[in-house]
């Protein structure tokens, strides 16, 4: 019982490290540089007050035209 738990925990740890490495490589080679340089301003975590403001914030944050 104890050994199977250790095997599962080891598998989770190995998979976590592998996932971290793969996502790091993906960000380094496949994500354009302008996406990485987004600076969060003070309004980025503010809750919109109405539906129209929510739509404008969505369009602005997702760079829709």
Image (tube, grey):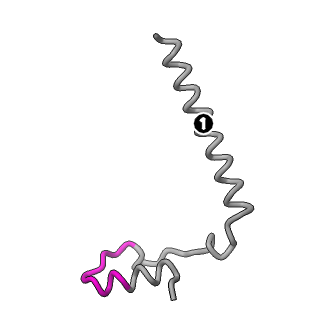
The percent position of residue 40, horizontal first and vertical second, equals 49, 74
Left or right: 24 with respect to 49?
right
Left or right: 10 with respect to 1?
right
Left or right: 33 with respect to 59?
right
The percent position of residue 3, horizontal first and vertical second, equals 53, 12
Residue pictured at 48% horizontal, 12% vertical:
2
Disc 1: which residue: 15
Q: Give the magenta part as a residue range.
A: 45-55
The percent position of residue 62, horizontal first and vertical second, equals 49, 78
Q: In this view, does 23 lie above or below 9?
A: below
Q: In this view, does 39 lie above or below 30?
A: below
Residue pictured at 25% horizontal, 81% vertical:
49
Residue 7 location, quadrant? top right
Identify the secondary structure beneath mark 1.
Answer: helix
Q: Which of 34 and 51 is in front in this view?
A: 51
Residue pictured at 38% horizontal, 86% vertical:
56
Q: Is residue 35 above or below residue 59?
A: above
Q: Which residue lies furthest to the front in this view?
A: 65
| Residue 26 in magenta stretch | no
The percent position of residue 57, horizontal first and vertical second, equals 40, 82
Residue pictured at 58% horizontal, 28% vertical:
11
Query: Label 1: few (<14), some or many (≥20) within 10 Å?
Result: few
Residue 48 location, quadrant? bottom left
- Counting the numbered discs, the total is 1
| Residue 54 in magenta stretch | yes
Q: Residue furthest right?
A: 29
């Amino acid at each position: 019982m104890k050994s199977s738990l250790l095997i599962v925990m080891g598998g989770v740890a190995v998979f976590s490290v592998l996932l971290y490495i793969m996502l790091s490589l993906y960000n380094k080679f496949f994500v354009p540089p302008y996406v990485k340089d987004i600076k969060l301003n003070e309004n980025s975590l503010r809750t919109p007050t109405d539906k129209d403001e929510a739509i404008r914030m969505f369009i602005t944050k997702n760079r829709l035209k």
